[in-house]
Structures are given as C-alpha cells and as structure tokens.
C-alpha cells in the first residue's frame, strides 16, 4: 500500500507542505508507505487540448509524466493546496488538467482513495472551496473521496498564508489534517485485510 501526497504550493517547505507532511506521517505510523511530490520548481505546462492523449502519450515534454506515473502506482492520493483567490494554485490546476490521459486511457485513478488539504491566510479563507475543487477533480477520475471525519468535514483545513510555519501553531487545523491521514490509512488498511 502506498499514499502519494501532492503539494500544489509554488513555495517549497511552506505551510501547505508542512500540513501535508503531518498527514503523511500519520499514514506512515499505520504501516503504509508514503511519498511526497511538491510542484514547487517543477515544469508543468498547460494542457492545450490537442487530443493526442486519446490514443497515445501527451506530446508535451515536462515534469508531468513522472508525476502521473506516481499517481497511477499509488493506492491513495492526498492533494494539498494553498488558497489562491478561493481556488487551487495555477500549478496544481495545470497538473489536474494534464491528468486527462489517465481518464481517457482506462480510468487509471478509479477507486483510489483520495483526500484534500487546504491552507489559507484566515480560518475561513476559502479552504473549503479549494477542497471542493480537489474533490471535484477526484470524482471525475472516479476516485473514492474521503473527509477528515468529524472535525472539518471537507478534509484538512488549516491556516497558512505568508507567515512562516504558522500552520504548526494551528492546533485545530492540524487536527483536521491528522484526522484525514487516519481516515485514509484506516480505509486502505481495511482493503488490505479484506483481501
């Protein structure tokens, strides 16, 4: 079993990545392998809807194919993003659009467990909209979307913004992030033991 964490922040080691690492840590404690991919510094071109992916590989040469391979080989995926104008970052949206080959060529993300984490400059800074955008993406891939249980209902929702490491002092936010990790680990472990 493996869970892939994708951090959509353009800033490395910032609040969103810290929050994602907290969720992955909980999952690792449950005996599940994890991997983190950050989009910071990655070359991710926009989809131009050339339709080449209907029958073959995407002709765009950048860092996306490697990320898509990691998504396909994972049993669960957590996507995290800071809130940019009430939505995910441009980098993450570009990656989401570029997953079209995975849908067109056999629904390769179908039935994978998925969850969302969002950070924002204030408690109600649009994080639920970010989680919703991530959930919509996952639903289009026929993934199984989970929440964080009873704490925030949409996923991990924490403080972020430009204040360095502010997420570490957000106890309520980190609780939602950790609960999301527990929920994903529980579901994946139940699948393992059902076999």
Image (cartoon, rainbow, N blue to C red):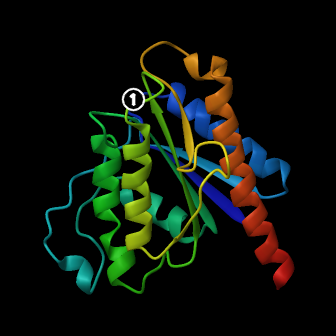
- The answer to whether any part of residue 71 appears in the image is yes
Look at 48% across and 24% down and name the residue there. 160
Left or right, 42 with respect to 153, comes to left
Q: Residue lying at the far front in this picture: please name it.
A: 150
Percent coordinates x, y for residue 134 in the rendering: 41, 55
The residue lying toward the viewer, choosing from 53 and 193, is: 193
* Residue found 66% across the figure and 49% down from its top: 180
How far across and down, in percent of the image, does residue 50 sit? 13, 72
- State the image quarter where residue 95 is shown: bottom left
Question: Which corner quadrant holds the N terminus?
Answer: bottom right
Seen at 83% across and 82% down, the residue is 194
Indicate whether 50 appears above or below 107: above
The residue at 82%/85% (across/down) is 195
Q: Identify which residue, 31 or 130, lies in the foreground.
A: 130
Residue for badge 1: 125
Number of dots carrying numbers: 1
Question: Would residue 13 be seen by someone viewing this image from the given angle?
Answer: no
Q: Position of residue 129 (x, y in %)?
A: 37, 45
Secondary structure of the residue carrying numbered label 1:
loop
Q: Quadrant of residue 40?
A: top left
Q: Please say if 191 is above or below 82.
A: below
- For this view, does 168 lie left or right of residue 120? right
Vertical arrangement, residue 140 with respect to residue 3, above or below: below
Query: Which residue is at the front of the view, 105 or 189?
Result: 189
Q: Seen in the image, is 111 located left or right of residue 59? A: right
């Amino acid at each position: 079993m493996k869970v892939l964490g994708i951090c959509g922040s353009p800033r490395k080691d910032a609040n969103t990545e810290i929050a994602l690492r907290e969720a992955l840590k909980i999952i690792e404690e449950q005996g599940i392998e994890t991997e983190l991919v950050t989009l910071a510094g990655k070359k991710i071109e926009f989809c131009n809807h050339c339709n080449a992916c209907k029958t073959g590989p995407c002709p765009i040469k950048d860092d996306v194919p490697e990320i898509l391979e990691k998504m396909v080989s994972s049993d669960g995926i957590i996507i995290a993003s800071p809130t940019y104008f009430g939505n995910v970052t441009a980098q993450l949206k570009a990656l989401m659009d570029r997953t079209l080959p995975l849908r067109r060529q056999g629904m390769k993300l179908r039935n994978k467990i998925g969850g969302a984490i969002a950070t924002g400059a204030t408690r109600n800074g649009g994080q639920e909209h970010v989680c919703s955008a991530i959930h919509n993406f996952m639903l289009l891939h026929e993934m199984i979307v989970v929440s964080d249980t009873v704490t925030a209902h949409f996923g991990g929702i924490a403080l972020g913004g430009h204040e360095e490491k502010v997420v570490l002092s957000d106890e309520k936010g980190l609780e939602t992030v950790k609960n999301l990790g527990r929920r994903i680990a529980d579901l994946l472990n139940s699948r393992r033991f059902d076999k």
